Image: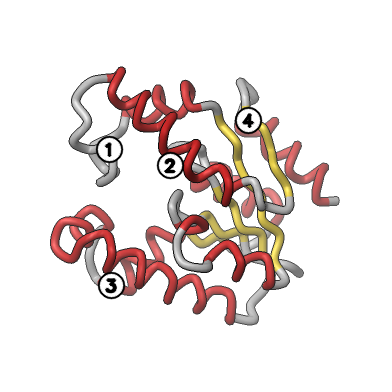
C-alpha cells in the first residue's frame, strides 16, 4: 500500500482530514508537526522561537526524508504547510512512491480559520488584524502555490463537510 501525503497551507485541514481519512481507510496516521515535536522534544512554536525558522526547515527536511525512507507503507501523513516549499522536499515527494494530495482552500476561508486559532501557529501569531492576516495568507499562498500545485491530486475544498471531503478523496484514489 502506498503512503498518502496531504499537503496544503496551514489551516487547510490536513491534520483533521488526515486523521479521519486514516480511520476510514484503516491506516495509520502521522501528523508531521507532532512527529517533529516528538523527535525534537519541543513544540513547533518553541522551536521557531528558540532555534529559528532556518533550523526548523533543516530538521523538517531531515524528518521528511526519514518518513520517505520508512518501508511501513499505507499511512496517511499530514505535512506541515511549508514542508513542500523548502529545500527539494516537493521533488523528494514526487520521486517517492507516494500519493500527494493538495487540499486547496481559498485564502479567504484559510484566513477565517486561522483568525480563530492563530496562537498556535508561529508564522501568524503576531498578526493583529484580520485584514493583515488575510493579506498575509493571500501573499503566502500565492508564493507557495507553485509547489502545492505539483501534487498528484489537487482537491478544491469549498463548503463540503469533512465526511464529503474524505469520500471525495477515496473516490479519486480508488
Q: Nearer the viewer, mark 3 or mark 2?
A: 2
The relative height of residue 150 versus residue 114 in the rendered view (above or below) is below
- Whole-percent x, y for residue 142 in the image: 50, 36
Nearer-N-terminus badge (2/4): 2
- Whole-percent x, y for residue 112 in the image: 40, 22
Mark 3 and mark 4 residues within 8 Å of each other at the beta carbon:
no
Q: Nearer the viewer, mark 4 or mark 1?
A: 1
Q: Which is more toward the observer, 20 or 154?
A: 154
Q: Is residue 82 left or right of residue 20?
A: left
Nearer-N-terminus badge (4/1): 1
Q: Residue at x 47, y 21 (%)?
A: 108
Q: In the drawing, what numbered circle is on residue 167?
A: none
- Image quadrant holding the N terminus, namely bottom right
Would you name the residue on which mark 4 appears? Answer: 157
Would you name the residue on which mark 2 appears? Answer: 10
Q: CA distance from mark 3 to mark 1?
A: 22 Å
Mark 2 and mark 1 residues within 8 Å of each other at the beta carbon:
yes
Q: In the drawing, what numbered circle is on residue 124?
A: 1
The relative height of residue 5 versus residue 74 in the rendered view (above or below) is above
- Whole-percent x, y for residue 154 in the image: 70, 42
- SS type, badge 4: strand
Badge 4 local density, few (<14 within 10 Å), some, or many (20+)?
some
Nearer-N-terminus badge (3/2): 2
Badge 3 local density, few (<14 within 10 Å), some, or many (20+)?
few
Badge 2 local density, few (<14 within 10 Å), some, or many (20+)?
many
Q: Residue at x 67, y 32 (%)?
A: 156
Q: CA distance from mark 4 to mark 1?
A: 22 Å
Q: Residue at x 25, y 46 (%)?
A: 122
Q: CA distance from mark 2 to mark 4?
A: 14 Å
Amino acid at each position: 500500500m502506498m503512503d498518502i501525503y496531504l499537503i496544503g497551507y496551514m489551516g487547510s485541514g490536513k491534520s483533521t482530514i488526515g486523521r479521519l481519512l486514516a480511520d476510514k481507510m484503516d491506516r495509520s496516521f502521522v501528523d508531521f508537526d507532532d512527529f517533529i515535536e516528538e523527535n525534537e522534544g519541543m513544540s513547533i512554536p518553541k522551536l521557531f522561537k528558540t532555534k529559528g525558522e532556518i533550523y526548523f526547515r533543516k530538521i523538517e527536511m531531515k524528518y521528511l526524508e526519514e518518513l520517505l525512507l520508512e518501508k511501513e507503507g499505507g499511512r496517511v501523513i499530514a505535512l506541515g504547510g511549508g514542508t513542500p516549499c523548502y529545500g527539494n522536499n516537493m521533488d523528494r515527494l514526487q520521486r517517492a512512491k507516494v500519493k500527494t494530495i493538495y487540499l486547496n482552500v481559498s485564502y479567504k476561508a484559510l484566513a477565517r480559520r486561522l483568525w480563530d486559532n492563530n496562537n498556535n501557529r508561529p508564522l501568524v501569531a503576531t498578526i493583529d488584524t484580520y485584514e493583515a492576516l488575510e493579506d498575509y495568507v493571500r501573499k503566502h499562498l500565492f508564493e507557495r502555490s507553485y509547489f502545492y500545485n505539483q501534487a498528484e491530486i489537487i482537491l478544491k475544498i469549498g463548503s463540503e463537510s469533512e465526511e464529503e471531503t474524505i469520500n471525495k478523496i477515496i473516490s479519486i484514489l480508488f
